[in-house]
Image: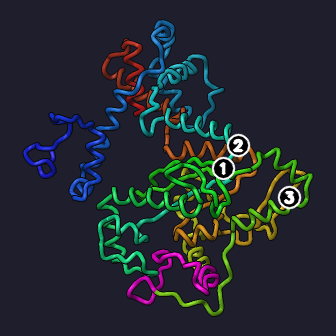
Amino acid sequence: MYPTLFPWGIGGFESERICKLSFGAQAKSLLDLHDPSFRRHWSFIFVVANIKQRRAIHLRSQLAFRSRDFDWFSRIIQDVDAETVKRVSEHLAAGGSRNTLSRDEGLVFNLLKQCELLLVRVPGAKAVMNRARADIRSYVGEFGIFHLFLTLNPKGKYDPNLQVFYGDQTIDINSVAPQLPHPSVRAVRLADDPVAGCDYFHFHVAAVFQYLFGWDVRAQTITPSGGILVRLSAYFMVKEHTMRGKLHGHVLLLLDGGLNPRALRQKMQADPEFNLCYLDFFDDLIHHHLPDAQTNPTEAPSTTTGKTRVPREERAPDPANPNYREVFEQDHRLLGELLQRHVCRAVRFKGGRIPCRFLFPHEVGEEPSCDASTNSINLRIKDPNVNWHYPTLLVATRHNHDLKSVHSGKRRAAAAAFITSYATKSDETPTNQVAMINTVFQRLEQQDDVDIATKSLLTRCIMQFG
C-alpha cells in the first residue's frame, strides 16, 4: 500500500521496530514532516482517519444494553415485526406524534432505547456530545453561567499566514498589504494541503485568545492585563467543518465577575446607575450597525496589482499610526459591508425553514433598553441586516464573526445545546433511527432470519446507525 510513500514497504505503519511507535503517533509525525508528500497525497489522510475511527469504534465501544436484560427484552422483541416497524417509520416521517401510537407500535421505542453504544472516546459519537454538555455544566457550576457566545469564521484563502503555512517563502507578512497569488491559486493550495489549513486555523484561534482576549494559551489562564473583552474567567470551544470544507469555532465566553441572570436583573432594577453602565458596556462591545461612509477616506495601499482594494487580505492598522482612528473606521465599514452584512443565501433556509433561520431582518431599536415588565434586555439595532459583531475583533482578524450577549438562562441553555449538537452534526433523531431500524427488519425478512438472537439484532441496528 502506498508504494510511492513507503518504497519497498520500509517505514510503514506498525512495522517491527526497536522502539514501538503507535499508529496515531506515526500518522501525526508523517503529516508534520517538512516533506509535503504525505499531507498532500490525495487519499492518505482519508485512509488514516478511517482506520483510526474504525479502531476506536471496535476497541472503545460497548453496548449500553446489559446481559441481565436479555430475557426481558427477548420477550418484548417477539411482539415487534417488520410491518409494525415500517408503519411507525412512515408515521413519524409524515410528522406524526409518538402519543398517537398503539401499544404494539410503542414497543419499537423500547428497541430504540437499547440501540445505544458507549462511545465516549470516539470522535463525533453521541456520547461525545453528551460529555461536552456535562463539561459545560461543570464550567457553569465552577465559574457561573457564560455571558457571550462567539462564532469565529477564519477564511485562510484570504489570509497571508496560510500561504506561509503552505510553504510559500515569497510572502512578506510584515507588509501592510502583502502581495498574494491569484485567488484560484490560493484556493487550490488550501484544497491541496488540508493539514496547512488545520494548522493555520489552530494558530489563528490561539493568536486571537493570546493577543486579543488576553488568555495565556500555554498556562491556560487569563493574563494580568486582560484583553479587549475585559477579563475572561474561562471559555469552552468546539470546532467543526462547515459545508464549504473549512474549520470554524463556536465559543462560550465566561467573563470574570459576571452575574447570573437572576442576580443581574435584581441589581439592574435596584440600581439605575448600574443599569445604565451595563447597557453602555454591551452597546460599546457589540454592534448591529456600521460606521457612516466618510467623505474623504484615508488612502490605504492595495493588496493586489490591480486597482481594487481587498481589505480582508491586508494587515490590521497599526495603533501607533497618527491616523489610526480614521483608518480603523474605514476598515470597519469596508469589512463590515463585505463580511457582516447579512445576505439570505440558500444555507439560511436549510431544513426547509421559511423565513430566514437567523430571523433577518431584525427589528430596529435606536437605544439599548431594559424592560422591567418582561425582564428582557434589548441592545441597540440601527441596521436590521448587519450581524452582531465587535468592531475591534473584526478589524483585527479580517474575517466574519458573530458575537452575541446572553442575558437569560433559557438563551444560555439554548446556546449550550446548540454548541454541542450543531457542532457534531448528529442526525440521530428518533425519526431517523426508527427508519434505520426499519431497514434492519426489512433485510432480516428478506434473508428469512427473523428469529435472530437479541444481541445480534441490536448490533445490526447500531451498525445501521453508524
Dot 3 corresponds to which residue?
A: 274
Q: Three-letter amino acid code at disc 2?
A: Gly
Q: Range of the magenta residues?
A: 302-329
Q: Three-letter amino acid code at disc 3?
A: Phe
Q: Of label 1 and label 3, which has the lower sequence position? A: 1
Q: Nearer the viewer, residue 296 or 96?
A: 296
Q: Residue 88 at x, y = what percent?
A: 53, 27
Q: Residue 358 at x, y = what percent?
A: 63, 58
In the rendered view, would you say 93 is above or below 341? above
- Left or right of residue 414: residue 407: right
Question: Is disc 2 in contact with disc 1, using a CB cutoff of under 8 Å?
Answer: yes
Q: Residue 116 at x, y = what percent?
A: 47, 25
Q: Residue furthest front?
A: 224
Q: Three-letter amino acid code at disc 1?
A: Leu
Dot 1 corresponds to which residue?
A: 254
User: Which of the labelled discs sits on residue 144, or is there none?
Assistant: 2
Q: Residue furthest bottom?
A: 296
